[in-house]
Image: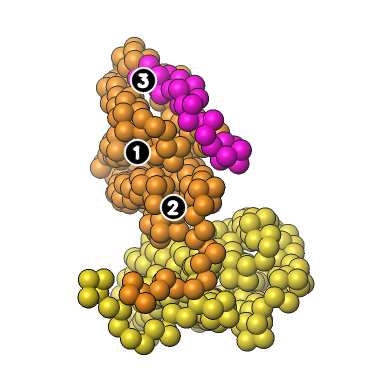
Chain colours: A orange, B yellow
Amino acid sequence: MPELSIAQYDLVYNMFSFTFATLLAAFIFFILVRSQLAPQYRTAMIMSALVVAVAGYHYFRILESWSAAFTLQDGVYVASGQPFNDAYRYIDWLLTVPLLVAELIYVINPRNRGRLTFTLATAAALMVILGYPGEIATDMGTRALWGFISTLPFLYLVYVLFTGLGGAMQEQTPQGRILIRNARLLLLATWGFYPIVYLLPIFGVSGSAAIVAVQVGYCIADVAAKAGYGLLIYAIASEKSKAAGWKYEAVTTPVPSPMS
Amino acid sequence: MPELSIAQYDLVYNMFSFTFATLLAAFIFFILVRSQLAPQYRTAMIMSALVVAVAGYHYFRILESWSAAFTLQDGVYVASGQPFNDAYRYIDWLLTVPLLVAELIYVINPRNRGRLTFTLATAAALMVILGYPGEIATDMGTRALWGFISTLPFLYLVYVLFTGLGGAMQEQTPQGRILIRNARLLLLATWGFYPIVYLLPIFGVSGSAAIVAVQVGYCIADVAAKAGYGLLIYAIASEKSKAAGWKYEAVTTPVPSPMS
């Protein structure tokens, strides 16, 4: 690891902590808000909660690993000798990326949601797994090759999400359609950050500024793609619950006891 | 960090621990009491729970950072060399201040609550973000400038909270109006502590007594503005639930089993 100024080290540390706190708040929100939705959309909220729980755990670990990787010496942070464990991110993606895709399918709720979820979650997992040999490769040719291979399941995913849901999209309310479009675009926009980071070593970008930029970028991408995306899934579920006649907030008297 | 007596160090440490315990208790209370309220006021309790959860996490971190920043040497606490991380507070505010405003809007429940929440939460976040460059500035002119700029969204917030809710306030019960007025005053009173701390360096106040006073003051302000304020939101929600015909406590006979 290169030398970091105190401000650089602190910025990354504080962004990790901010991301952890945001994921924690999102987890509590997704758990609690479930009962306010029509039953058919609660599974999507459970999945959203799983995503931010898994990501929160990994951010806690990443923060600890970051602390252990540096020592303050003469006013700058130098490598302590312990490596900064970035593999946490791949483990995180392996679990969360299929779930992010599943969330969207469950809230859209097409007729064949089980099969579609299995196919797309498999594609999402393949995308992560096939990227990893390139991530740990030392030569740039191997990195580029695996990067290319892992792009194929990604393209398949994008193709199905943007064209294969045509029938199910017709069944949404106009407001629901706008929200689903936004969720798909958010997925695409935030996922776009990961290949950029993947390509940096190929373009020879390194040094302290690059490390700081990459870690801060990952934090912003994860907050948007996991907590923010989950909020959009909630908004879709809430809109569709209302459209389905679920009047959670209109109940002003308690449910009478069964025998009264 | 200046030298602290054992009593000074312990006072701050114990106040951090007290604040953490209070926030934890408030979190559990807000979660559990939700189901006793009419459904339309439960979202406000979820937001109250998120606020104290996020603040609790940060107090846990602040307590650890405080411990690490000092070493006991010859009967006094001296700086260990590790910095005391005060950035946790800004990250906390960035997440909690918009939520505190949102809580109040959701419990008042005006017709345009979605749009109003978005506008005021944005103003609250801007207030925190614009204060930060001044907080880390070393010269007092920059500090004063950013302090002034961040006061503008604050004034906008106060203006809307105290005048812009006129219509919605007419729909509250007399008891509800009193409670909402108290919640707004508590917000204003506790938020008043933060600019005072912000201005201390400009007035040249520093040294161990100032550090202790600032940290103890933050604890009191956070307990009042987060746990205490959440309790007021609960009281408003409870009052409004009753007014809406929600008779949670009126069931005096046990619910018979479905098969009896």
Residue furthest left in the image = B260
Q: Which mark is residue A99?
A: 1
Residue A258 position in % (x across, y down)? 33, 71
Q: Are marks 1 and 3 on the same chain?
A: yes
Q: Residue beneath label 2, please? A: A38
Above or below, comparing residue A102 to residue A73 in the picture: above
Q: Nearer the viewer, residue B184 or B40?
A: B40
Q: Nearer the viewer, residue B121 or B146?
A: B121
Residue B9 position in % (x across, y down)? 38, 79
Crowding near the residue tagged with mark 3, few <14, some 14–19, many ≥20 C-alpha atoms within 10 Å: some
**Most common secondary structure along the magenta stretch:** helix
Tag 2 secondary structure: loop
Q: Nearer the viewer, residue B198 or A130?
A: A130
Q: Nearer the viewer, residue B21 or B102?
A: B102
Picture residue at 39% right of the left edge, 32% below the top: A111
The kind of residue tagged 3 is: Pro
Tell me the quarter of the picture where residue A28 sits.
bottom left
- The chain under label 1 reads A
Picture residue at 49% right of the left edge, 21% below the top: A163
Tag 1 secondary structure: helix
The kind of residue tagged 2 is: Ala
Q: Which residues are magenta?
A: A150-178
- The chain under label 3 reads A
